[in-house]
Amino acid sequence: MQISLNFTKSVPENAALYYEKAKKAKKKMEGAKKAIEISRQKLAAELLNQQKQQKETEKKQVEREQLILRQSKKQWYEKFHWFFSSEGFLILGGRDAITNELIIKKHTDPKDIIFHTDLQGSPFFVVKSEGKEIGERTRIEAAAATAIYSRAWKLGFDNAKAGWVTPEQVTKTTKHGEYITRGAFVINGKMHYIEHDMRFAVGVDREGRIIGGPYLAVQAHSEKIIEITQGDQKPSDLAKQLRALLKAGTPDEFIRVLPSGNCKIIRI
């Protein structure tokens, strides 16, 4: 190690000069260490952000693949409102005039039963018997679904009535040749009314499908369910919340199963 001395200065002055240089060097070193630490923290944050983005990209890719897989496996009845009763019967409901018409004309067999409410624009719901005796619990759940997906939900009813008839009681023929609009039918004879509350739930079935319907029916086919009632949340906002809670599906899939009108979560 070589040290240069200034012979015009005394030894103490030379020592003081080197002391000052050492202090400056130390400050520079500390500054360099701080700069290195800041750079290290920035790099770590950037790497963490990249990892998060990578995980998010992978998650979205998995969700897209799952959605494509679900769509490829869609059953014919998934174009309608649908659910399975707690007794295992498939129950279909019209989403609009076109699907109302389609359900009654093409997907109703003689041993099925048809549900409808007296409210204007009510959907038709059909319980598919598949040759079996339809139980009382299934009838109650079908009546509840018919009421929930009618205007009764939007109007805030706590309870509503839905009546059931046999397929032979439902026709397009009128007594005086009046015009029947698409999705509307004439019901002949007596309707058997069932009054039920508006308990509605959303869940995920064993096949990973988003399901919605009367509380007891959804409970029978989903390990985790969320109960919903009339409220002040838009379906689009609620759908995002449901997706986050159930960790499944897409917002659009949840919107498809929700009743028409604002909702809110009351129990998870």
Image (cartoon, grey):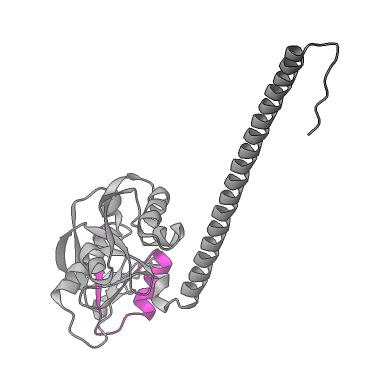
Q: At which x and y percent is residue 60?
A: 53, 61
Q: Nearer the viewer, residue 151 or 43?
A: 43
Q: Is residue 175 visible?
A: no
- Tell me the residue at 50%/77% (across/down): 72
119 on left or right of 57? left
The magenta segment: 92-119
Q: Is residue 145 visible?
A: yes
| Numbered circles on residues, count | 0
Q: Which of 149 and 189 is in front in this view?
A: 149
- Where residue 33 sits, quadrant-wise, is top right
In the picture shown, does residue 72 fall above or below 247? Answer: below
Position of the N terminus, as image quadrant, is top right
Q: Is residue 52 magenta?
A: no
In the picture shown, does residue 242 fall above or below 44? Answer: below
Q: At which x and y percent is residue 90?
A: 29, 77
- Tell me the residue at 27%/86% (across/down): 130
In the picture shown, does residue 126 fall above or below 159? Answer: below
Position of the C terminus, as image quadrant, is bottom left
202 on left or right of 216? right
Q: At which x and y percent is residue 19?
A: 70, 20
64 on left or right of 205? right
